[in-house]
Image (spheres, helix red, strand yellow):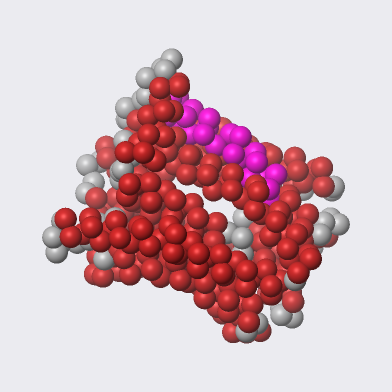
Amino acid sequence: MIIIPVIVPFFESKGLTLAEVFFLQSFFAFFVVVFEIPSGYVADMLGRKNALLAGSLFHGMAYCWLFFADSFAGLVLFEMLAGIGLSLLSGADLSLLYDSQEALGQSPEEKTRGIANMRFSKSMAEGVSALIGGVLIAWSFDVTVFANAIAACVPLIMALFLTEAPFTKMAKGQHKENLKEVVSHLFLRDRLLRLICLNSTFFGLATFYVVWMLQPYWRDQGIPLTAFGLLWAAQSFLFAGATKLCMPLEKKFGARPLLVAMGLLPVVGYVGMSTLGGTIGILLSFSFFLSRGINQVLLTDALNSRVPGAFRATANSMTSFMFRLIYIVTGPLVGLMIDNFGMKMTLLSLGIIVIGMCLTVLLPLLQGVGESERGKGKGMPEI
């Protein structure tokens, strides 16, 4: 992820407008959508390690190709390879972690800590890579992309040494029945699980749009390109801290205060960036990473703890599928809105939309969690 802190200026150096950058990301989302559920299904049928090996191969190919991509079509090919790689990796890694924890007989608290540790490690690595990217960009984009290509080949080597934990595989030759079972389990039988999936998706989107707006926002505030790596690293380290604090805070205060914070922090970020700007606007942009940290530990654990191991990878892929499918439609609209109405108006509009999400999907989840807590008495609240 070395190039990521300056990825928008990098795309612009290839002649892309900001709207085209969002269109490019919609292509990425499209390729993820096309392969997301099939790849999770492959992981459930043929094994998590095989999916991780294949995903790592496509991931390495993508960033090696990025070094040579010099046109919009070339960048679309990069997004395609990266999308296939991510779709293979996204459900399989979490499933392998949960399978391993179950094989080791870990407690629910230990499983939640494992999710937090996984997110923490990832965000710390992204922070370090952002610092590296911030240094390398002083030379050129080419040097930064070349370093990213080398780093992108490492996961394939690591995947070779994974040992797959035993898990119950879905029945072969019953593909339609298997997928119907996954959809029914996630969205029809359990209202709380359905709300968990919806909130994970929509608040994931709420903190994702801004990722492609931060770098042009920093530039508009007069931040030099060489400082982008420092800012991105700081946000990654803040995300890492949020993932570490999530479990002890849930244990002490319950899930609902954290869920409220998850919903309100993006509102603070969007409105603050739009109306205040400058140093304060940049500081408030950090709120998105706190919200994302809560989402990716609290809701990810809530989902995986309620899904049978037989189709866990498919379930994780299906939530990612929903996320990307919505982004295919809405991402380009955000880019067009920035080009036509400006950054401030777009940020403010997104803040208003997130308020609507808090009322329509978060509030019912808070009510559902409250009912669950009352049913379990005064012990540690569960989501």
Horizontally, is 322 left or right of 8 in the view?
A: left
Up-down: is 52 above or below 339? Answer: above
> Residue at the spot x=32%, y=38% of the render?
189
Quadrant of the image containing the N terminus: bottom right
Q: Position of residue 168 (x, y in %)?
A: 32, 27
Q: Relative to the observer, which residue lies in front, 14 or 59? A: 14
Q: Give the left or right position of residue 109, taking residue 163 as reference.
A: left
Q: How many marks?
A: 0
Q: Position of residue 101 (x, y in %)?
A: 29, 43
Residue 213 makes an appearance in the image: yes
- Residue shown at 57% from the left, 70% from the top: 351
Q: Is residue 116 above or below residue 338?
A: above
Asked if residue 49 lies left or right of residue 235, the reply is left
Q: Is residue 27 magenta?
A: yes
Which quadrant is home to the C terminus?
Answer: bottom left
Q: Position of residue 79 (x, y in %)?
A: 70, 44
The magenta stretch spans residue 358: no
Q: Nearer the viewer, residue 179 or 55?
A: 179
For residue 117, what is the image quadrant?
A: bottom left
Q: Quadrant of residue 313?
A: top left
Question: Relative to the observer, which residue lies in front, 17 or 47?
Answer: 17
* Residue sitting at x 48%, y 61%: 357
Q: Where does the image place residue 226, in percent across and percent down from the top left?
A: 72, 72
Observer able to see residue 136: no
Residue at 42% across / 44% down in the picture? 94
Provide the major secondary structure of the magenta segment. Answer: helix
Tell me where the magenta segment starts and ends, as one range. 25-50
